[in-house]
Image (cartoon, rainbow, N blue to C red):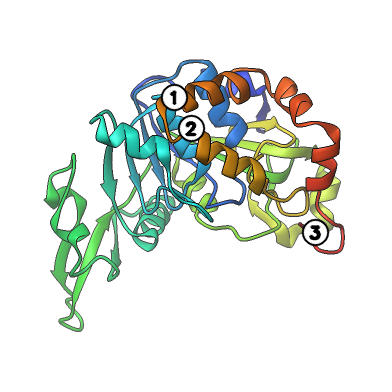
C-alpha cells in the first residue's frame, strides 16, 4: 500500500544527480507545488525527463535545480520561449537534449513496457537526428532498416528515471490514481520510474474510486507515495478543479525576462510556503479560477 507523506518529505527524498520524470503537459496538471518545493530545499544537479513541460520546468531552470534535461518542448504555452531556460542555456549551465514530443512519449512508453528502445519516424531527416548536446549521437538515436519491410525507422532509447512525480485529480489511500482529462505522458512516465510519487488535489476513500473505475489510470499496487496537494498545479490547470491562471503566467513570463526579475519572483511566489502563496493569491481570485461543474474548467 502507498505511504502518505507531506510535500516536504516527497521533495526531500530526491538526491542530487537523480534522474526524474516530472509530469504535466503544457498548461495541464503541471507539478508546480512540487517544483517550488525543490527550489525551497535547494535541490540541484537533477537530470529531467518530460514530453511537454512548461512553467514548472522554467522555474526549475531558474532555481538551478536541473542540470540536464531531455524534452520534446520547453516553452510556455500561449506565450512562447521560456525565459529562465533560455538564460541558463546561454550561460552554459543547462544542457539540453532535444527530442520530439512523440519520441519522448515513446521513450517513456518503452520504459513502462520494460523494453530497451522504441521505433519512431518523427525524428528522421531532422537536425535532431544529426546533433547531440551531451550524449553520443549513437546513444540518442539509431536509424535502422526494418527487417520486415526494408523501410528506415528511428530507434530511440527507453527511459527509466529514478523518480516519477505526477499531479492528478484524486488518489485513494491505497494509491489508486484517477485522471479526469488527457493522460498525456504522465501514466507512462510514472510507470517507467523506479520510485513513484503521486501528488493529488484530494485523497478519497477507496469506495469513491470503485464507483468510477474506468478513470483509474495507475493502480495503487505500483505507487510508492501519495501526497495531498490542493492547488498543486497552480498557475496551470487541473480539469474539474480549476482553470489555468493566464494573468499570472503572463506576469511571470514578463518579469522573468531578466535575472533580477526572476529573483524577485522567486522571493515573492516560490520561497514562501504553499499556504502563504494561496493566501497571497486570495480567495476572490481562487474562486474565479475554480472549475464550473458543468464545464470542468
Q: Dot 3, crowdedness within 10 Å: few (<14), some or many (≥20)?
A: few
Q: Position of residue 190 (x, y in %)?
A: 51, 44
Q: Nearer the viewer, mark 2 or mark 3?
A: 2
List the residue tagged with mark 2.
59
The relative height of residue 124 versus residue 212 in the rendered view (above or below) is below
The relative height of residue 70 versus residue 5 in the rendered view (above or below) is below
Instruction: Say which residue appears at 50% left-offset and 54% top-offset.
Output: 185
Q: Nearer the viewer, residue 6 or 124?
A: 124
For residue 33, what is the image quadrant? top right
List the residue tagged with mark 3.
212
Instruction: Say which residue appears at 65% left-offset and 36% top-offset.
Output: 199
- Say which quadrant the N terminus sits in: top right
Q: Position of residue 48 (x, y in %)?
A: 38, 37
Q: Earlier in the sequence, mark 3 or mark 1?
A: 1
The reply to whether callout 3 and callout 1 are in contact (CB within 8 Å) is no
List the residue tagged with mark 1.
63
Q: Earlier in the sequence, mark 2 or mark 3?
A: 2
Can see residue 194? no
- The alpha-carbon separation of the residues under discs 3 and 1 comes to 40 Å
Residue 19 tag number: none
**Position of 138 compared to 98: left or right?**
left
Instruction: Say which residue appears at 15% left-offset and 53% top-offset.
Output: 131
- The alpha-carbon separation of the residues under discs 2 and 3 comes to 35 Å
The reply to whether callout 2 and callout 3 are in contact (CB within 8 Å) is no
The relative height of residue 294 versus residue 37 in the rendered view (above or below) is below
Amino acid at each position: 500500500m502507498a505511504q502518505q507523506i507531506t510535500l516536504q518529505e516527497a521533495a526531500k527524498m530526491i538526491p542530487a544527480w537523480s534522474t526524474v520524470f516530472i509530469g504535466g503537459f503544457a498548461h495541464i496538471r503541471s507539478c508546480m507545488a512540487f517544483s517550488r518545493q525543490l527550489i525551497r530545499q535547494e535541490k540541484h544537479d537533477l537530470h529531467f525527463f518530460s514530453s511537454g513541460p512548461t512553467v514548472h520546468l522554467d522555474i526549475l531552470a531558474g532555481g538551478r535545480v536541473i542540470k540536464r534535461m531531455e524534452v520534446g518542448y520547453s516553452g510556455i504555452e500561449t506565450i512562447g520561449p521560456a525565459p529562465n531556460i533560455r538564460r541558463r542555456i546561454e550561460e552554459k549551465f543547462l544542457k539540453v537534449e532535444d527530442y520530439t514530443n512523440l519520441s519522448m512519449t515513446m521513450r517513456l512508453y518503452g520504459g513502462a513496457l520494460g523494453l530497451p528502445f522504441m521505433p519512431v519516424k518523427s525524428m528522421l531527416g531532422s537536425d535532431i537526428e544529426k546533433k547531440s548536446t551531451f550524449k553520443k549521437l549513437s546513444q540518442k538515436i539509431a536509424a535502422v532498416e526494418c527487417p520486415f519491410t526494408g523501410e528506415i525507422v528511428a530507434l530511440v532509447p527507453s527511459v527509466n528515471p529514478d523518480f516519477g512525480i505526477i499531479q492528478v485529480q484524486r488518489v485513494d489511500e491505497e494509491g489508486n490514481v484517477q485522471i479526469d482529462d488527457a493522460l498525456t505522458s504522465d501514466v507512462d512516465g510514472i510507470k517507467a520510474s523506479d520510485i513513484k510519487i503521486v501528488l493529488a488535489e484530494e485523497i478519497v476513500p477507496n469506495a469513491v474510486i470503485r464507483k468510477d473505475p474506468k478513470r483509474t489510470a495507475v493502480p495503487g499496487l505500483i505507487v510508492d507515495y501519495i501526497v495531498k496537494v490542493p492547488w498543486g498545479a497552480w498557475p496551470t490547470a487541473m480539469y474539474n478543479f480549476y482553470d489555468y491562471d493566464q494573468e499570472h503566467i503572463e506576469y511571470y513570463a514578463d518579469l522573468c525576462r531578466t535575472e533580477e526579475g526572476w529573483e524577485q519572483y522567486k522571493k515573492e511566489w516560490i520561497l514562501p510556503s504553499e499556504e502563504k502563496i494561496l493566501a497571497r493569491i486570495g480567495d476572490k481570485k481562487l474562486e474565479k479560477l475554480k472549475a464550473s461543474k458543468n464545464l470542468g474548467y
